[in-house]
Image (cartoon, helix red, strand yellow):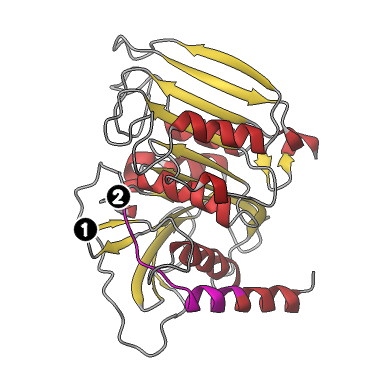
Amino acid sequence: MSLVYKKFLIFVKNLYFFLGALLITSCGGEGASDKPFDTSADPSPNPITEPECSETAAGKIINCTVTYNGLNRQFSYYLPSSYSSESEDLPLLISLHGGDDTSEANISYTGFSDLAEENEFIALFPQGSVAEDKGSTGWFTGTCDTSEVCDLGYIDFILDSLSSEINLNIDLDRIYATGFSNGAFMAYSLACNLSERIAGIAAVSGSMDIGSISSCNPIHTMPVLHIHGDADLQIPIDGSEYHENVEDVINFWKEFNECTKVSILEGSDKNFDGNAWRTNIYSECLNNVNVEYVVLSGFDHNWPYFQVNSFSNSDIDGSSLIWSFLSRFDINGDREGE
């Protein structure tokens, strides 16, 4: 595909999202008390602007502001200290905060900037906007034809900007998404509706919106990791009138990927809280992708972390597990098959 044609597709895509913009609804998510970013409407007749960022420097968080569909939006990203303009293309991980949460808090509780430094990938932390009916930050997970805030378009726009305006060296076959709570719903939405860019997802303490399974049709196989506590009362594992039963979500993805084998890994009680964990591993799927479902016994609505000889709220370290899982794949499937 020629560069001119790629730029034409990007233009058409952004025009589509601009004409079909929609309103945010946040659902779920806890863990942040930081004051939300200002997402008030921009009165400018030009509703989309290029990002304005703090000085780009490897080994630090770079903060950016942008106007998208008339809203003042923010995102941050981390470049490993080894990065330079001469670097080979690096994978990118999108980390999506929960409802009533911030990207700043997400940077802190996930530790993905530290993992990005250790494993040489780019970590992207978009900021959701404020839902007027709730007064709290979050993600609108629907498609861009029913509301004024288009988060699918916004994230797509950020990815375009990082590649074309900020000129980062990104491996476009290795863009992943993960999210907590409402951010997990958004990660699933990206897998369903922006699969041409997303190589795999990991969801923590979230699900898919009720009724969204029937309309989900990615254009390629999709590796999926799902982590959930069976004591989660905010996003119950067995579903609600607003979200799908997690078992149904897992069944959809294993059937979509045509997985034919299941195995169960029983985990031990590493943090000595009396609870353990298990992972259902669905393998022998198309393109050798996997679907993995981690159930944390007695765990509530939180981001799981574990450190040896330190206080840990879980028997697993969610962030490390997420990167270990996603990094095995690219948009074509299992990277070991390259």
Across and down, in percent, residue 215 comes to 56, 51
The residue carrying mark 2 is: 99
Q: Which residue is mark 1?
A: 134
Please state which of residues 168 and 185 is positioned toward the viewer in this rendering: 185
Is the C-beta separation of discs 2 and 1 under 8 Å? yes
Badge 2, how many Cα within 10 Å: few under 14, some, many 20+? many
Whether residue 68 is situated above or below residue 288 in the rendered picture: below
In the image, the segment drawn in magenta is 13-26
Could you tell me the amino acid type at mark 1? Lys
Q: Residue at x 56, y 56 (%)?
A: 193
Residue 227, x across and y down, in percent: 44, 30
Residue 82 is at least partly visible in this image: no
Residue type for callout 2: Gly
Quarter holding the N terminus is bottom right
Q: What is the x, y in percent for residue 313? A: 30, 24
Q: Relative to residue 93, is residue 295 drawn left or right? A: left
Q: Is residue 323 left or right of residue 125?
A: right
Dot 2: element: loop
Mark 1: few, some, or many residues within 10 Å (few <14, many ≥20)?
Answer: few
Assign a secondary structure to mark 1.
loop
Q: Compared with residue 204, is residue 70 higher up or lower down, i.e. above or below?
A: below
**Which residue is rendered at x = 30% and y = 44% of the image?**
28
Q: State which quadrant residue 51 falls in.
A: bottom left
Question: Does the stretch in magenta take in 173?
Answer: no
Residue 228 found in image quarter? top left
Please state the horizontal and vertical placement of residue 191, each as a whole percent of the image.
56, 49
